[in-house]
Image (tube, rainbow, N blue to C red):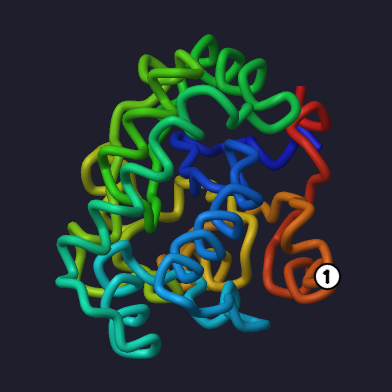
């Protein structure tokens, strides 16, 4: 599989479910958060909010569940609920740390394009000592449209100073894969427990598929 890195100058990563094993956390947070307001987490919620920015997701929750909160209050609660989990309970995906080290040694640039809030991104990167691995971190709140639109990955490539055709994107969900493809980039889909039922769709959309990063070492 190492051939997929040939002629690439930059590696672009989603965060949750791609670099770190954290999708379980977000489902739990959604359930706890809605439970506070006497509501249950409906089936299929994760697919409906897939690719939305942190702010857009807050707006979706406020309108769908008629929450008596401002958008800033919703985001602040989510941030508080997630920070400790990111710091102490979320591990890197298998082989991710070793793969990032190899990429750095090879002189490849690395960037993150995530729908998450910046405080949460910083918390998990610091906890896993990943901060030095990345030269650019872009959140969906910094661009006009979230995934599956290409804006976020085009912004990461711009910050890295790399042509989109020279980038390889790693993603765990269909919306993210589409964002990378629409940006004119090659995309490698990454297996994750919470999107395993979508494996066939992920394989059909992406250029490559891996179960974990050890396949690239």
Name the foreground residue: 193 vs 98. Answer: 193
Q: Is residue 14 above or below residue 5?
A: below
Q: Across the whole image, how many numbered discs are drawn on residues?
A: 1
Name the foreground residue: 59 vs 217. Answer: 59
Name the foreground residue: 151 vs 29. Answer: 29
- Where residue 181 appears, as percent x and y from the top left, is 52, 68
Give the residue drawn at x 38%, y 58%.
115
Q: Is residue 38 above or below residue 126?
A: below
Snapshot quadrant of residue 140: bottom left
Outermost residue to the top: 105
Would you say 193 lies left or right of 140 here? right
Would you say 110 lies left or right of 28 here? left
Would you say 84 lies left or right of 193 here? left
Q: Quadrant of the N terminus?
A: top right
| SS at badge 1 | helix
Q: Which residue is mark 1?
A: 197
Name the foreground residue: 28 vs 102. Answer: 28
Would you say 148 lies left or right of 69 here? right
Give the residue drawn at x 38%, y 75%.
149
Q: Quadrant of the C terminus?
A: top right
- Where residue 65 appears, as percent x and y from the top left, is 39, 86
Give the residue drawn at x 30%, y 47%.
156
Q: Is residue 153 above or below residue 131?
A: below
- Where residue 175 appears, as percent x and y from the top left, is 54, 72
Give the residue drawn at x 61%, y 52%.
23
- Where residue 185 appears, as percent x and y from the top left, is 49, 59
């Amino acid at each position: 599989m190492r051939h997929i890195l040939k002629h690439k100058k930059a590696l672009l990563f989603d965060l949750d479910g791609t670099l770190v094993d954290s999708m379980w956390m977000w489902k739990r947070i959604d359930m706890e958060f809605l439970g506070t307001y006497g509501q249950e987490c409906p089936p299929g919620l994760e697919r409906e909010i897939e690719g939305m920015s942190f702010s857009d997701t807050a707006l979706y929750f406020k309108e769908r569940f008629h929450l008596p909160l401002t958008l800033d209050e919703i985001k602040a609660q989510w941030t508080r609920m997630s920070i400790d989990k990111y710091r102490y309970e979320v591990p890197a995906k298998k082989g991710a740390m070793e793969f990032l080290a190899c990429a750095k040694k090879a002189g490849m640039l690395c960037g993150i394009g995530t729908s998450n809030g910046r405080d949460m991104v910083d918390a998990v990167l610091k906890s896993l000592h990943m901060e030095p691995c990345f030269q650019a971190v872009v959140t969906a709140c910094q661009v006009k449209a979230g995934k599956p639109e290409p804006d976020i990955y085009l912004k990461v490539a711009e910050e890295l100073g790399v042509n989109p055709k020279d980038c390889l994107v790693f993603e765990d969900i269909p919306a993210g894969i589409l964002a990378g493809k629409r940006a004119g980039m090659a995309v490698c889909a990454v297996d994750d427990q919470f999107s395993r039922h979508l494996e066939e769709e992920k394989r059909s959309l992406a250029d490559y598929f891996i179960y974990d990063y050890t396949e690239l070492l």
